[in-house]
Image (cartoon, rainbow, N blue to C red):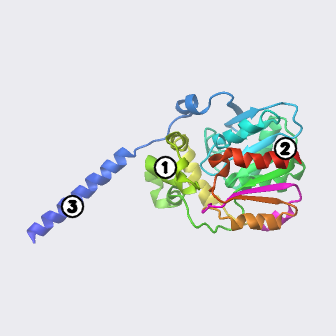
Amino acid sequence: MKRLLQIVLTLVLLLLLALAAAVAWSWAPDRPLADLKPRWALPPSQFVAIDGMLVHLRDQGPRDDPAPIVLLHGTSASLHTWEGWVAALQAQRRVISLDLPGFGLTGPFPDGDYRIGHYSAFLGKVLDQLRVPRAVVAGNSFGGQLAWQFALDYPQRVERLVLVDAAGYPRNATSVPIGFRLAQIPALAPLMANVLPRQMIESSIRNVYGDPGKVTPELIDRYYELTLRAGNREALRQRFLQVSAGDDSRRIAELKLPTLIIWGGRDGLIPPDNAERFNLDIAGSRLVVFPDLGHVPQEEDPARTVAQVQRFLGE
């Protein structure tokens, strides 16, 4: 009996040591904005003061464009996800991309309100600051939900809509990145505030790509380091607490503007049947599905996806 007790105590000690080593290895406290800007805010990045925040954005292309293109990223992403599209569009069109509050270098909303209506009002203030009365609004995932919500809230300000694997209908995910799952467990909040295994970020990115082989070390670095921006992890947790997916989905059918729907056929987070619902609900919309791509097709294959956007804008 004494021997068995010694073995159990030894195993418990080894387990605690292993846990301590894992925490130490993955220890990642918040990083200040100043530490991240040299790598992730290269020209033409700028920071614009709006509602007590310094909003990270890029405003590229000709200034005489009557309806600039505004690009809205998804959850835990940043304006960098659109770099391929911007490169293809900026010669002829003014293109505005930004880090939404709670993500990228912009950081959290000062008032802690992450409801979709608050984001919609924020976007209106961004366009006011940039003197853009009317725009083509494109969004991926959560950014897609914001795009169609903004079109409903401010119809006079949206000329066309591009929805890329957009959120909106009640969740029916077949695969959810581990990072999103952990962020929704309240008991883990104190630990996750200072611990972030890089492998978890890698797994989450690979989960949303149609071809995980396209996930590069630099891509992992970007998502990992921008998640560490001070305030972003708590903002993500708060957004998941405040989100009410599907509450306004009945209003999607009210949209009466030219709409392009782009979807990755291998999207497990927001599966392609959501694309079909958007296509049915938005009269006259056009749906293009890329069977080999995942949840972020604009990032995974910018050339093929932006070609559809150029065709749509040229009509």
Q: Residues within 10 Å of mark 1 (few under 14, many from 20)?
A: many
Label 2 residue SS: strand
Q: Nearer the viewer, residue 82 or 250?
A: 82
Residue annotated with mark 1: 202
Q: Report which quarter residue 253 is drawn in.
A: bottom right
Residue annotated with mark 3: 11
Q: Is residue 14 above or below residue 43?
A: below
Q: Quadrant of the N terminus?
A: bottom left
**x, y (%) of residue 55?**
68, 37
Q: Nearer the viewer, residue 108 or 131?
A: 131
Task: Say which amino acid is labelled 2.
Answer: Ala
Residue shown at the point (36%, 45%) measured from the top left: 25
27 lies left or right of 155? left
Q: How many marks?
A: 3
Q: Nearer the viewer, mark 3 or mark 2?
A: 2
Label 3 residue SS: helix
Q: Is residue 16 above or below residue 25?
A: below
Residue shown at the point (71%, 48%) measured from the top left: 304
Residue annotated with mark 2: 135
**Which residues lie in the magenta part?**
249-268
Q: Residues within 10 Å of mark 2 (few under 14, many from 20)?
A: many
Task: Say which amino acid is labelled 1.
Answer: Glu
